[in-house]
Amino acid sequence: MATGTRVASLDDVPERGSYLFTAADRHATDREVILVRCDEEPGVRAWINTCPHEFQRLDRGRGAAMRDGEIICPKHGSMFDACSGECDNGEAAGTTLPAVEVAVEDGEVFLADDDYTFRHEGGIDDGGGPSSTSHLSF
């Protein structure tokens, strides 16, 4: 049996795009987290919903832009591998998305990271999440 709080059904995580939820870190600060599909086991990965280059949201409430297994930063177009979180191009080259551990069992995704506590599905309600300005269109 998977330990941790159920976050979503695996079916809730789109093949292209992301599933957004909010979790509190060990300092009780709410953080937006995205679930994205990954070709490696367990089939999804979870990342803090910000580009490490600038404090920009990857998923602004409509799903993160993705192409060929990579998450695209909407501000500069840097692309992060959905499985490793690593970026090797653009303004964010050499950075890695901060990971949040999840587990999948019987088609359900569980928050398995002891550093985070599940709050709710969706983004941070108070508007205190990272900003996002973009000149890119997809």
Image (spheres, rainbow, N blue to C red):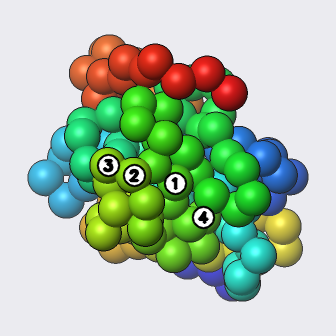
Task: Check the image and report above or below for 3 versus 75.
Answer: below
Asked whether the residues under the numbered discs 2 and 3 touch, taking CB atoms below 8 Å apart as contact, a structural biologist would say yes
Residue 9 is at least partly visible in this image: no
Q: Nearer the viewer, residue 60 or 72?
A: 72
Q: Which of 28 and 72 is in front in this view?
A: 72
Q: How far apart are marks 2 and 3 (CA)?
A: 4 Å
Q: In which quarter of the image is residue 17?
A: top right
Q: What crowding class fits label 2: few (fewer than 14 Cα within 10 Å), some (14-19), or many (20 or more)?
A: few
Nearer mark to the viewer, of 3 and 4: 3
Asked whether the residues under the numbered discs 1 and 2 touch, taking CB atoms below 8 Å apart as contact, a structural biologist would say yes
Residue at (29, 29) in percent of width and height? 130
Mark number displayed over residue 82: 4
Mark number displayed over residue 33: none
Q: Where is residue 15 in the image (x, y as percent from the top left)?
A: 83, 52
Residue 76 is at least partly visible in this image: yes
Q: What crowding class fits label 4: few (fewer than 14 Cα within 10 Å), some (14-19), or many (20 or more)?
A: many
Q: Which amino acid type corresponds to the residue marked 1 in the rendered image?
A: Met
Task: Check the image and report above or below for 58 versus 35.
Answer: above
Residue at (24, 40) in percent of width and height? 54
Q: Which amino acid type corresponds to the residue marked 3 in the rendered image?
A: Glu
Question: Who comes first in sequence, dot 3 or dot 4?
Answer: 4
Q: Which amino acid type corresponds to the residue marked 4 in the rendered image?
A: Ala
Residue at (72, 50) in percent of width and height? 67
Q: What crowding class fits label 3: few (fewer than 14 Cα within 10 Å), some (14-19), or many (20 or more)?
A: some
Q: Which residue lies furthest to the left in this view?
A: 27
Asked whether the residues under the numbered discs 2 and 4 touch, taking CB atoms below 8 Å apart as contact, a structural biologist would say no
Q: Position of residue 70 (x, y in %)?
A: 63, 58
Mark number displayed over residue 91: 3
Mark number displayed over residue 90: 2
Quarter of the image where the N terminus is located: bottom right
